[in-house]
Amino acid sequence: MQQTTQIQPSFTLKTREGGVASADERADEVVIGVGPAFDKHQHHTLIDMPHGAILKELIAGVEEEGLHARVVRILRTSDVSFMAWDAANLSGSGIGIGIQSKGTTVIH
């Protein structure tokens, strides 16, 4: 008989959605733009990694470089290139990262 074990994440990600995101002037800011379904309708990447874990590691990497991370949901498109572009336009530093629900990521 085969047993299966589910691994539970040791952390949780709590997000809140506010109003419309606006551009910032912080020179040390990196905006992470997630797709419309990211952790809302879909919760894992193609390799079954939880979206919360993806964001946790990205934010940790940004902060490790001494920068500030801000996460926004991009609703106008699911195209990862345009999500990264929109994120960069919202960022004070001009650096944006776009992430699709399936895990594809673009840095702009």
Image (spheres, rainbow, N blue to C red):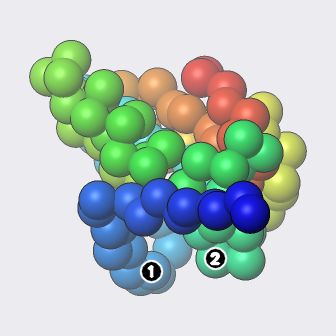
Crowd around label 1: few <14 · some 14–19 · many ≥20 (10 Å):
few
Q: Which residue is mark 2?
A: 40
**Image coordinates for residue 95, horizontal then vertical, percent:** 46, 26
- The quadrant of the rendering that contains the N terminus is bottom right
Q: Which residue is mark 1?
A: 17
Q: CA distance from mark 1 to mark 2?
A: 11 Å
Which corner quadrant of the image does residue 92 belong to?
A: top left
**Image coordinates for residue 8, horizontal then vertical, percent:** 42, 64
Callout 2: SS: loop
Residue shown at 45%/80% (left/top)?
A: 17
Callout 1: SS: loop
User: With respect to residue 78, does 13 lie above or below?
Assistant: below
Residue shown at 32%/68% (left/top)?
A: 12
**Image coordinates for residue 101, horizontal then vertical, percent:** 72, 54
> Looking at this view, is 40 or 83 the one in front?
40
- The quadrant of the rendering that contains the C terminus is top right
